[in-house]
Amino acid sequence: MTKGYWVAQVDVNDMEQYKKYIAANAKPFGEYGARFLVRGGQSENPEGKRRSRTVVIEFPSYQAALDCYRSAGYQAAIKLRAPASVADIVIIEGYDGPQP
């Protein structure tokens, strides 16, 4: 079974409110086995457009990634995030095939 990922690009306009979202998402992330791979660290943008913060979260499966996003707990967290930020989120299945 391949892993699932959330790739999020976020512009935060109210960090104090955004911290409430971070606290609220901890429970659903724990319930669905989320693991942060990238959480807004140093970055460069050599091509295209991006937002100021990038987050990559790994889940044990694509289905777990979808279920977490759709869960009541995470939907409640979104209500805290929405007034504090603008986000683009992609939920994507990992690749498990041949490598170069």
Image: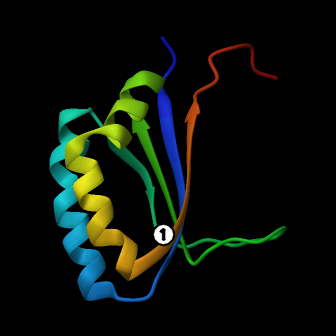
Q: Looking at this view, is 99 or 75 the one in front?
A: 75
Residue drawn 35% across and 31% down?
67
Regarding residue 29, the answer to whether it shows in the image is: yes
Say what secondary structure mark 1 lies in.
loop
Rate crowding at label 1 as few (under 14), some (14 to 19) or many (20 or more) other CA atoms within 10 Å. few
Q: Quick check: 67 above or below 51? A: above
Please provide percent x and percent y for residue 20. Answer: 19, 73
Residue drawn 38% across and 72% down?
82
Residue at image mark 1: 41
Residue drawn 42% across and 33% down?
66
Residue drawn 50% across and 38% down?
5
Q: How many marks?
A: 1
- Horizontally, residue 27 falls left or right of residue 3, namely left
Q: Quick check: 97 above or below 90? A: above
Regarding residue 61, the answer to whether it shows in the image is: no
Please provide percent x and percent y for residue 9. Answer: 56, 64
- Residue type at mark 1 is Gly
Please provide percent x and percent y for residue 81. Answer: 34, 70
- Horizontally, residue 19 falls left or right of residue 60, namely left
Q: Can you tell which quarter of the image residue 63 is in?
A: top left
Q: Quick check: 97 above or below 19? A: above
Q: Quick check: 92 above or below 21? A: above
Please provide percent x and percent y for residue 85. Answer: 44, 78
